[in-house]
Image (cartoon, rainbow, N blue to C red):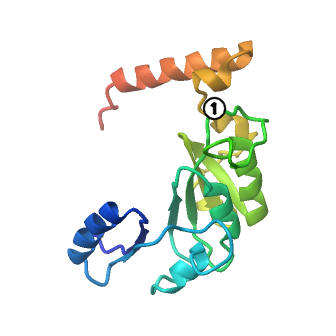
Amino acid sequence: LEKGWSGVMIEGEPDRFAELLRTAALFPKKLYPIGRFISPTAGPDCLDRLLATTPIPKEFEVLSVDVDGPDYQIWQSLVEYRPTVVIIEVDSNYPPGMHHIHGAEASASSFTSMIELGATKGYTPVAHTGNIFFVRSDRVAEVVTQGAKVRSFEHLFSYTRKSAAGNARRLATYYLQRIRRRLDRRTPPPRPD
């Protein structure tokens, strides 16, 4: 916001919304707070309708969905707006290849189910950190480095111990990912020449 961006923030919890209002007061006409819970289905509280109450354009830069539940359904119901980047939470305990969409028995949808939803909406996954980072497919060439190709999406997945359990290849990948993260933290950044 201090760099000229603007945004919409939606919060349904009253205490958190009160904090959001205090923050929004610091950024008038730049931060638009909405005090509602987003409905995962069509209706007055669906994301399309809530965004329509703000000056946000139909095409904007970043949408982040992290509601600890029906993230899949919220994005699925978004039809009027086309963000360039979508960051959305998944349940990383479901390894690639397992299909699961949020319902009463689980808190979030699986990596594979979200990848498939993104494809139907015209988005390409570029990273997974527990959240999947998608880029609109017509803009992905601007983000993916020159010469790099998006291969099978499984290589993006960051395994948890639970999602790796019971499969030797996934377990080996889990431990290699942990080792790489530890080494990355210890390796000093390269010096500029």
| Visible residue check, residue 151 | no
| Visible residue check, residue 48 | yes
Q: Residue at x 31, y 84 (%)?
A: 29
Relative side of 111 to 3, left or right: right
Question: For mark 1, does the 10 Å Cα neighbourhood hold few (<14), some (14 to 19), or many (20 or more) residues?
Answer: many
Q: Residue at x 33, y 67 (%)?
A: 17
Q: Percent from the top left, x then y, of residue 140?
A: 64, 59
Relative side of 128 to 94, left or right: left
Q: Percent from the top left, x then y, of residue 13?
A: 39, 62
Q: Residue at x 61, y 56 (%)?
A: 71
> Circle 1 is placed at which residue position?
93
Badge 1 amino acid: Asn
Secondary structure of residue under mark 1: loop
Could you tell me which quadrant the N terminus lies in?
bottom left
Q: 127 or 159: nearer the eye?
A: 159
Could you tell me which quadrant the C terminus lies in?
top left
Q: Percent from the top left, x then y, of residue 12?
A: 43, 65
Q: Residue at x 75, y 47 (%)?
A: 113
Depicted 24 relative to depicted 108: above or below: below
Count how many numbered circles sit on residues in the image.
Answer: 1
Relative side of 25 to 114, left or right: left
Q: 2 or 142: nearer the eye?
A: 2
Q: Percent from the top left, x then y, of residue 76?
A: 70, 64
Residue 91, by quadrant, is top right
